[in-house]
Image (cartoon, rainbow, N blue to C red):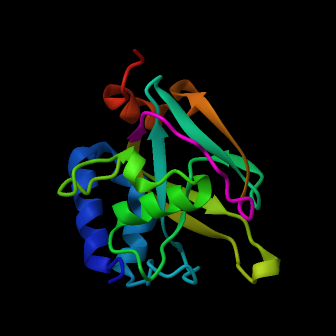
Amino acid sequence: MTVTRPEIDHVLSKYLDRHPGETDDMALLLHALDEGHDITSRKEFRAGHVTAGAAVVDTQGRVLMIRHKTLDRWLLPGGHLEPEDQSLLGASLRELEEETGIPWQQVVSPPAHDVTPADIDIHKIPANPAKDEPEHHHFDFRYAHWVEETDVRLQFDEVTDFAWRPLSDLPTNLARKLEPVAPTGN
């Protein structure tokens, strides 16, 4: 089973119920959905496509960042949907494990019935002539995950480094969403 358009609609609706002030920020995603774009396909470039991210917070309240090889930027772990992904939350956990080696069994995530991501971020991805990809957007559904102990083992095909950063290093909007639920240090 793959992530479906109805699931994306449902998750987005729940997210906007929780964050009604962000409806205008979701305009491009809402437009792509209204136009019937196949936003689950990584080959959908008219507006962009859905990705799944992982905002991983440790017991000291730090967030895991990775240095993305292609974009040469510090980002949250995450990436494109795959046909075998059964949910957006599951895609987030798969991407986390692929890029950092942190198995889903070491992660505390939202309850399965709470499909609402901590954040949805829409950001522009530059054209990549080597992959024949034009400039487009990623509609990144970011889920909050918590870990107690980790042994990060990077996937060097996509990632060059990692760091545990304070929440204050994140954009204010995302940091604020993670702060109330981040575990505190002992």
Residue 149 counted in the magenta span:
yes
Q: Is residue 30 left or right of residue 81?
A: left
> Is the magenta region chiefly helix, strand or loop?
loop
The location of residue 117, given as percent across then percent down, is 34, 52
Q: Is residue 24 left or right of residue 124?
A: left
Camera-side residue of 179 and 29: 179
Look at the image and tell me in which quarter the C terminus lies.
Answer: top left
Query: Is residue 171 something that shows in the picture?
Result: no
Q: Outermost residue toward the left? A: 113
Answer above or below: position of 165 versus 41.
above
Q: Outermost residue toward the top? A: 186
Span highlighted in magenta in the image: 146-158
Camera-side residue of 101 and 138: 101
The residue drawn where x is 76% and y is 62% is 70
Q: Is residue 64 left or right of residue 115?
A: right
Query: Is residue 21 something that shows in the picture?
Result: yes
Answer above or below: position of 164 versus 157.
above
Residue 123 counted in the magenta span:
no
The residue drawn where x is 46% and y is 25% is 61
The residue drawn where x is 32% and y is 79% is 4
The location of residue 46, given as percent across then percent down, is 56, 80
Camera-side residue of 97 and 111: 97
